């Protein structure tokens, strides 16, 4: 097996003397969909923020493509090939769908943030290609403010993909979406990830999404990993069922 795109070794972070993340280690490979799940307060967001550079761990290391990036700023981690989407979509509502992606491309290519310069226009074809990957090319000229919520989620994915990431971090990517839209977004993400060899780490509360699209699942409880493996193995784990799944997943 090839080396993982991302490795985390013994990550730890406390808030007010309480360990939010306590000795978490994980790895994710190219083309793999890895889900990190757990109850509210389990430490998922803190773990994500350490991987992304928003929080510096008290202990442990983050290795991206063989490089130690522990505590590096988010912009540095992003430039090394990490894309991220958020639970609440973060787009420029007054700008068009196309211009939102062009903004990401301007940053990726280290150009000034001006959408009216020739430097920006040269990225229009690249932006349209990114939109085509998520099925939004027909809405390129529409303002983001008028998009349906599901389309905003797909736009956010296109923006993250504009960076040509090797790793994609997705924080509750289907939050607020209708069930059919959730399945469609995750199926699209999985297809793109496997075609492009992108490693995907995502958190999610919808267990149908998790068990339907993850290749592997890790379960956090009170800052510690309590289980990990295939969806089938995690589904059958007695401790996981006790602290999180209950009897609702069959």
Image: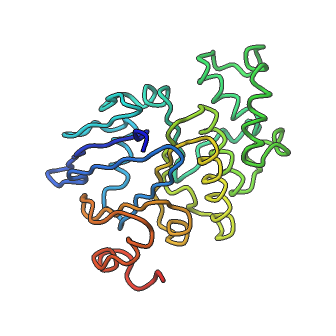
**As displayed, is residue 159 above or below residue 88?**
above
Q: How many marks?
A: 0
Q: Quadrant of residue 57?
A: top left
Q: Quadrant of residue 44?
A: bottom left
Q: Nearer the viewer, residue 190 or 180?
A: 190
Kindly give the residue lying farthest to the bottom in the view shown: 247
Residue 192: x %, y % from top left? 64, 47
Residue 33: x %, y % from top left? 50, 54
Q: Nearer the viewer, residue 51 or 7?
A: 7
Image quadrant where one finds the N terminus:
top left
- Residue at x-position 59% and y-position 63%: 176
Query: What color scheme is it?
Result: rainbow
- Residue at x-position 20% and y-position 48%: 14
**As displayed, is residue 119 above or below residue 22?**
above
**As displayed, is residue 165 above or below residue 156?**
above
Direction from residue 181 to residue 75 in the image, left or right: left
Residue 32: x %, y % from top left? 50, 51
- Residue at x-position 76% and y-position 35%: 129
Kindly give the residue lying farthest to the front in the view shown: 1
Residue 242: x %, y % from top left? 30, 80
Direction from residue 201 to residue 138 in the image, left or right: right
């Amino acid at each position: 097996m090839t080396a993982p795109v991302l490795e985390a070794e013994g990550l730890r972070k406390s808030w007010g003397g309480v360990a939010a993340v306590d000795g978490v280690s994980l790895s994710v490979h190219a083309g793999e969909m890895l889900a990190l799940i757990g109850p509210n307060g389990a430490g998922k967001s803190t773990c994500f923020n350490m991987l992304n550079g928003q929080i510096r761990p008290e202990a442990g290391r983050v290795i991206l493509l063989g490089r130690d990036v522990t505590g590096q700023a988010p912009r540095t981690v992003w430039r090394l090939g990490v894309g991220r989407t958020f639970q609440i979509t973060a787009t420029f509502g007054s700008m068009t769908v196309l211009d939102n992606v062009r903004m990401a491309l301007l940053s990726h290519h280290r150009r000034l943030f001006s959408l009216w310069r020739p430097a920006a226009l040269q990225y229009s074809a690249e932006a349209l290609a990114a939109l085509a990957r998520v099925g939004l090319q027909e809405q390129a000229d529409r303002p983001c403010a008028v998009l349906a919520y599901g389309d905003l989620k797909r736009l956010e994915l296109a923006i993250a993909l504009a960076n040509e990431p090797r790793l994609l971090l997705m924080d509750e990517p289907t939050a607020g979406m209708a069930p059919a839209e959730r399945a469609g977004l995750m199926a699209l993400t999985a297809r793109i990830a496997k075609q492009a060899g992108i490693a995907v780490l995502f958190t999610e509360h919808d267990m149908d999404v998790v068990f339907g699209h993850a290749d592997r699942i890790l379960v956090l409880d009170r800052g510690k990993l309590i289980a990990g493996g295939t969806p089938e193995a995690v589904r059958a784990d007695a401790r996981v069922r006790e602290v999180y799944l209950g009897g609702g997943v069959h």
